[in-house]
Image (cartoon, grey):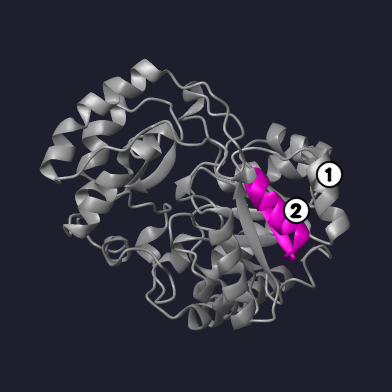
């Protein structure tokens, strides 16, 4: 494990910051207490909401943890396309007896206010998704003693992170559940994402930064594989989604291993940005027509998703999941950490034995 992380976690396992409620303070603390690095998701929260969760984590553990921020989004969505999509979803709103949301909400996710809090009362690590912070922001965190990590999906994005002075990159393969952390949302590249192992190799040759590998990782053997491929740590999201400490909807947790949901796909149906989830009715019917309009579509469908969950209908929920979802294990977070570490040790021993033959 890179020296940049040895004081943050005992094991090379990071719990992914899953925006939308899954990454509770209880989950973050449990993972950190077990020797991993737990991470809060500040996305979709107010600055004060983020701060209150940080205080909760500090009350549960003295171990290091991280906080993930969404970068502000540029205005490039076509308002007419969003209105066409609103009309298409009118029948869904009627069926679930709810209202479609307004699409003129803020595109910055309270970024500046969150920065101010994190610089005033620093946490050990801050990561960024949907873009790269400026060199000035990274330098401010460096002065505050906070490590910075930028989520990247291409070697070019990794180079941008290195130029900004980031301490590490989180290399996100196409297998990852939830949103793809691309720096620029380009519909023409929706199906051009790189698999994790290929991406790790390309990023390692493009930059001189520690690598956190993310995308479809569910077992200790997979963690060993990405470490052997050049990663310093492995980040797991879906694996922790089904733990009791996770704040994910019960229907979402159950869907991970429900035989009704056979596979995952990338879709813009729920948020207007490419995100991997279990294929359900809503994704099949509306995904082909959803515009590239984040966070407008996220605001538009928020009420629908909540109403579907309330009605007990997973067919209109955003069931974010990585490609390894069928390997999910319903274990408490600390126990899952123990199992992952044991599997990792076993895989390392097997590698060593083969090398000695």
Q: Earlier in the sequence, mark 2 or mark 1?
A: 2
**Which of the two residues, 350 or 68, is positioned nearer the viewer here?**
68
Residue drawn at the location 37% of the way across and 64% of the way down? 248
Q: Is residue 267 visible?
A: no
Q: Secondary structure at mark 1?
A: loop
Of all residues, the one furthest to the left in this rendering is 95
Left or right relative to 261: residue 291: right
Q: Quadrant of residue 284?
A: top left
Q: Quadrant of residue 156?
A: top right
Residue drawn at the location 24% of the way across and 57% of the way down? 309
Left or right relative to 304: residue 28: right
Percent position of residue 135, x then y: 82, 39
Magenta stretch encompasses residue 119: yes
Q: Secondary structure at mark 2?
A: strand
Percent position of residue 90, x then y: 18, 31
Which quadrant is the C terminus positioned in?
bottom right
Residue 9 in the image: above or below residue 203: below
Left or right relative to 271: residue 210: right
Residue 328 in the image: above or below residue 97: below
* Residue for badge 2: 148
Which quadrant is the N terminus positioned in?
bottom right
Percent position of residue 199, x then y: 63, 42
- Disc 2, disc 1: CB below 8 Å? yes
How dense is the environment of label 1, judged by Cα within 10 Å: few (below 14), some, or many (20 and up)? many
The total number of labels drawn is 2
What is the magenta range?
112-128
**Which of the two residues, 170 or 297, is positioned nearer the viewer here?**
297
Residue drawn at the location 31% of the way across and 40% of the way down? 301
Residue 37 in the image: above or below residue 268: below
The dot on residue 165 is 1
Percent position of residue 2, x then y: 80, 63
């Amino acid at each position: 494990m890179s020296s940049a992380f040895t004081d943050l976690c005992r094991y090379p396992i990071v719990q992914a910051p899953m925006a939308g409620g899954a990454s509770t303070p209880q989950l973050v603390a449990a993972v950190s207490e077990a020797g991993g690095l737990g991470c809060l998701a500040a996305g979709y929260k107010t600055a004060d909401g983020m701060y209150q969760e940080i205080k909760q984590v500090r009350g549960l553990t003295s171990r290091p943890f991280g906080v993930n921020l969404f970068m502000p989004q540029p205005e490039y969505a076509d308002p007419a396309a969003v209105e066409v999509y609103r009309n298409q979803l009118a029948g869904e709103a009627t069926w679930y007896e709810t209202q479609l949301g307004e699409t003129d909400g803020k595109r910055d996710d309270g970024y500046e206010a969150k920065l101010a809090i994190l610089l005033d009362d620093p946490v050990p690590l801050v990561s960024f998704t949907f873009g790269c912070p400026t060199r000035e922001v990274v330098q401010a965190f460096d002065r505050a003693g906070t490590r910075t990590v930028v989520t990247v999906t291409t070697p070019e994005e990794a180079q941008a992170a290195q130029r900004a002075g980031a301490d590490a990159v989180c290399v996100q393969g196409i297998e990852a559940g939830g949103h793809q952390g691309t720096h620029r949302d380009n519909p023409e590249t929706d199906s051009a994402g790189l698999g994790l192992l290929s991406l790790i190799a390309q990023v390692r040759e493009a930059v001189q930064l520690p690598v956190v590998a993310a995308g479809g990782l569910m077992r200790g053997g997979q963690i060993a594989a990405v470490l052997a491929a050049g990663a310093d740590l492995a980040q797991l999201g879906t694996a922790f989604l089904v733990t009791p400490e996770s704040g994910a909807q019960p229907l979402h947790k159950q869907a991970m291993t429900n035989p009704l949901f056979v596979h995952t796909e990338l879709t813009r149906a729920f948020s207007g940005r490419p995100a991997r989830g279990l294929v359900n009715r809503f994704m099949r019917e509306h995904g082909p027509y959803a515009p590239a309009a984040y966070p407008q579509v996220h605001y538009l469908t928020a009420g629908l998703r909540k109403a579907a969950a309330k009605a007990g209908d997973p067919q209109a929920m955003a069931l974010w999941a990585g490609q390894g979802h069928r390997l999910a294990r319903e274990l408490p977070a600390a126990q899952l950490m123990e199992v992952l570490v044991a599997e990792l040790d076993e895989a390392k021993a097997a590698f060593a034995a083969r090398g000695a033959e």
